[in-house]
Image (cartoon, grey):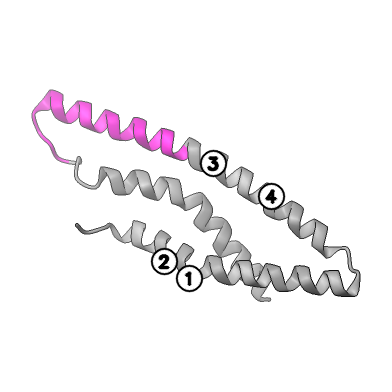
Amino acid sequence: MFFSADLLAEFTSLWFQAPMVMSSRMQGLAASGMNGSTGGPAEIGQMITEKLSATVESVMAVNMAMVKEGTIAATAMATGTFAGLAGASDRVAVAALKPYGKRVRANARRLSE
């Protein structure tokens, strides 16, 4: 079974950049706790907000992708051609992962500065 390039790109982004983002955030939280700065609670609030908004965006994207794939499948069945059906699961998976990957990449850029 082969995956699409888009799906592999999202998996790769999450696989390599998410641990770096988590370790950078933990280092920042530990440093802010030791020196008494107020950056820790703000970062925690941002983490929670990002997770919730990514989840909502992901659910909406999956719903839209499922509707689109259902329309493609219905059209294919009605016309007797099955073009466009291959890769449907990859396209739905990409729709689900893209919001998370977008935020991980943005955090990796922000935290590496």
Q: Secondary structure at mark 4?
A: helix
Q: CA distance from mark 3 to mark 2?
A: 20 Å
Q: Are marks 1 and 4 in contact (CB under 8 Å)?
A: no
- In the image, taking residue 85 as reference, residue 79 lies left or right, namely left
- Against 31, residue 65 (above or below) is above
Q: Are marks 4 and 2 in contact (CB under 8 Å)?
A: no
Residue at image mark 4: 48
Q: Is residue 64 magenta?
A: yes
Main SS class of the magenta portion in the image: helix
Tell me where the magenta segment starts and ends, as one range: 61-83
> How far is disc 1 from disc 4 in space, using C-alphas?
21 Å
**Considering depth in this image, is 43 or 61 the residue closer to the camera?**
43
Q: Are marks 1 and 2 in contact (CB under 8 Å)?
A: yes
Spatial CA span between label 4 and label 2: 23 Å
Q: Residue at x 24, y 33 (%)?
A: 72
| Amino acid type, residue under disc 2 in the picture | Thr
Residue under the point 19% across and 57% down: 1
